[in-house]
Amino acid sequence: MIKTRLASILKYTFLFAVALISIFPLLWMFISATNTSGDVLGGRLLPGTNLVANYQALIARAEVGQALWNSFRNAIVATIASLAVCSIAGYGFEVYHDRGKDFLMRVLLLSMMIPFAAIMIPLFMMVGRLNLLSTTTAFVLPTLATAFLIFLFRQSARYFPKDIIESSRLDGLSELGIFLRMYIPVMRSTYATAGIITFMAAWNNYLWPLIIMQNAESRTMPLLLSNLVAGYVTDYGLLMLAISISVLPTVIIFLLLQRSFAEGIVVSVK
Amino acid sequence: MVVKARSNLRLETRQSVIGWAFVIPAALLIFVFYFYPIARALVLSFQTGIGANMQFAGLANYRRLLSDNVFKTSLVNVLTFLALQVPVMLTLALALAYMLHDKRLRFRAFFRTAIFLPCATSLVSYSLIFRSMFSLDGFVNALLINLDLITQPINWLANPWTAKIVIVLALTWRWTGYNMIFYLAALQNIDSSIFEAAVIDGAGALSRFFRIAVPMLKPIILLTAIISTNGTLQLFDETYNITNGGPANATISISQYIYRLSFQYSPRFSYAAAISFVVFVLVAVLAMIQMKVGDER
Amino acid sequence: MKKSLLKVLLCVLVLSLLTSSVALANQEVTVWAWDPAFNLYAMEEAAKIYHEINPDVTINIVETPWDDIQTRLTTAVMAGQTGTLPDIMLIQDNALMKNVIDFPNVFADLTDSGVDFDQFAGFKVGLTSVEGRNYAVPFDNGAAINALRTDVLAEAGYELEDFRDITWSEYITMGKEVLAKTGKPLHSIVAESPDLIMAGLQSAGTWMFDENGDVFIAQNDVLKEVIEVYVELVKSGVMVQVNDWEQYITSFNRGTVAGTINGCWIIGSIVLPEEQKGLWGVTNMPRLERSPNATNYSNQGGSSWTVRADSANKDVAIDFLKHTFAGSVALYETILPSSGALATYLPAGDSPTYAVPHDFFGGQAIYAEITEYASKVPQVKYGVYNYEARDAIGVAIAQVLAGRDIDSALMEAEETVRFLMEF
């Protein structure tokens, strides 16, 4: 009895400690958004009264609304498109697996392994020649399909009970129908995880938008943030506020989706 | 009999074709937007010159790598990070996921969110915090002195070994939650009756973890292992922002060196391409080994 | 016959008038630069001035960090897409030679464009020219200053004047006194940043490359002296090393150090804390002793305006710069008071605005003084491999501070730079 009690106390202590260490920098960031620049640099841990002033200075300084919208639109389109294309591919690689597809999967995995800086310029040339500079299409297209996502869906498909597929076929469902009606609902946790990961990556993408977004109107949040640190004098309160705003969408989407990957449906076929 | 065999064959072929139809769009996109640029980069790596003046030079760039001390240092650095950080992080993520999978645990949503948040925190802000926490009069030194573990403050970022430790800590802090949610999602797909049966059989928590959870999670563990290996060998953000490769190149990563060669120094894109290919081959070899060991149905 | 010829001539005349005004109407010149308080503000004021001269031209200013300008520039040139670049780009002087030489025909040759380069401080013109041709209009002044807390000095029994025209040994000696009597180091520096070393080199008229562009590190006696000074500064505690830029700024904002040595643009950060008003003073930086051409003047940072060579608006852009940054004293008078943006345009230095006393610095007329410093900065050429050498020196400093002897550290630095230059 005492042993399990002790184990339980240790477990909760450990988890609280880990949670606190994880969350502290983010908390500090939110608190700093309410302080003056001098206080932030001085390491102040308490909230201050400078939030409104920081906010006013921020919107006077940069087009935050526009950057937020650009980032959001790019990230949502990228996420939905990527999930659609990659999940069906991952499903295909696993459910219809054969030597050919297994080999192709390994080849596709290789595409992740080259640093982006090496392929950046050929990609830029392609986009330029297709006249797609500064468009959402150009932003989304290169990362629409990633070996990472396909691999994630393939590995996850291994948990998808094959009996469902068989019984669905007997029920007369088409292959596409099985994917849409059976696979997607059951693999909700994988979709939620993939969704949050892809959204975050698209939101935080810096280098690619930098070189293909040619005008100020198409600027995304990460680019806006880097302007804030690029001056000779940086206002750290303002900066922390901008960063806090930039981080919120990802956090909100995580909060919305987290139930899905923690409380998914477990299907057992009798 | 023959009719049935033929219709079976047609069914299998139809399914195989449909399978390929599912797979081709994504594969095509990857060939166009990854492999084509990769091929061009490969061609570039066989040339030399500065800026836009290029001439063919065979394996000159690759031979040059053998005598490049900064490259060698950066390679040792990322391999060190790989060895020190990835196994610890994945194990921690796995343990946390298993703990948070327990439906009876209280505050699960809070823990889950808190542990995930580091990877959503902006790079600019958390590198600022890490640099400030590990400064001479920073939080970490104050804590260690208070706990009587050290007497003099450690100059974390000025010493090659402690600087590496700071990077390892930063990487672990940032990516453990990220890997944890993959494991959490996968655990949802494992029938809980398996665990319940094990409890009835008298298996303890640790035993359930190692004998059931880990083997069943093999496909996802393989995924995170490959992703983490790839991520560590291509590391850029942390070494650029927290230590800037210092002190004296003690923490410089390969990607950071590539960035310097491409954008800060006189542009050496062909040499940078050659280095990118070495990284490519290295990650590919490690990934193939991992696949060989862990990819089974 | 004559009537129809007349009609044709008339048509041609009307048409040419129409097309020429169409060509002038609504031309847009795009500019990329960073920092709204300084560079962008100066551009906006320049745009206002030029609007009076040529109302059909709009100046479109896009805020872009320096690193991003470099990334976009490199990518665009390598991908053959220079059309994506703006008409005017602000370029760091440290990177100017590298970009002009590595990307031929991207930057317009401004030598015969009508811009009078004699009106600019000699060292800036030197930095913005390659093989005798000018490629940029000099702008931001980076003349090195030694800014000090006069109240802390007084506490140790010193005055600002004691620090004028001194040598590094004198600086260290006085610094030790200040440290002993007040507990404050004289200044701080970001660890491994080669900036102070660079300033020291330029103050003696030398650099890490010689006139032919060859590496000049291991045999460079000036460099050796500078590094010895650096080590002595750290060992004596007169200079304290911090981990990053934020901690550097905090150190003098919070008063944990008694001053700083940097380019004059650091003034923007010095004047942040209200409570330090009136407690600062500015003088020139210390000089080296063993080096034959040692001076008390140097440069740190600074940037200049370049024009894209294949831009459709090239002539307008050059005209714009000629009438503003290269010709308007009024511009420099306007931007000085609110931004502290100091020019390298010498006529502006004669303006009464520049002689106004500055409250924060105890009524010292710092702007006039700094413009005078700028005129005395030795000319050097940073070279194409500037960044490679800077990084190598940064590594060398760390090694020397950890105990390695200077000669072998510099030998390794030279080898690293040679390696990078070799292909």
Image: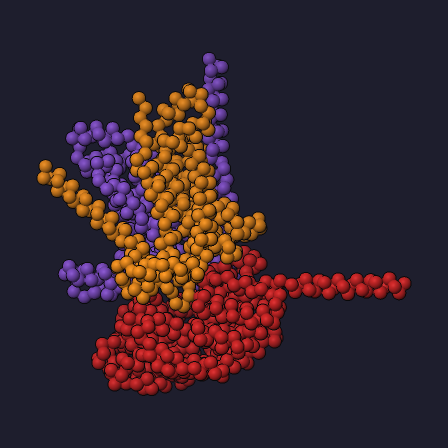
Chain colours: A orange, B purple, C red
Comparing C379 with C247, the one in front is: C247
Instruction: Look at the image and tell me whether residue C293 can be seen.
Output: yes
**Residue B267 visible somewhere in the drawing:** no
Against C12, residue B195 (above or below) is above
**Point 25% across, 85% down: residue:** C157
Viewer-nearest residue: C403 or C227: C227
Would residue C74 appear left or right of A49 to someone viewing this image? right
- Residue A25 lies, with reference to residue C152, above or below; the image says above
Numbered circles on residues, count = 0
Give the quadrant of residue A187.
top left
Residue at left 21%, top 39%? B105
Residue nearest the viewer, comparing B216 with A28: A28
Give coordinates of residue B91: x percent, y percent.
26, 44
* Residue drawn at point x = 49 percent, y = 36 percent: B24
Query: Given the current orientation, which residue lies at the most extreme right position?
Result: C1
Identify whether C203 is placed above or below A144.
below
Q: Residue furthest left?
A: A2
* Residue B248 image offset from top left, x and y in percent: 33, 65
The percent coordinates of residue C286 (x first, y second) are 35, 82
Instruction: Give how far across and how far down residue C91 sits, in percent.
Output: 49, 67
Question: In the image as oriented, which residue stretches furthest toward the top?
Answer: B1
Q: Is residue C253 left or right of residue C76?
A: left
Q: Name the residue rendered at 39%, 72% in the picture.
A: C268
- Quarter of the figure that contains the N terminus of chain C: bottom right
Give the camera-side residue of B227 and C174. C174
Q: Using residue B90 as the reference point, say whether residue B1 is left or right of it.
A: right
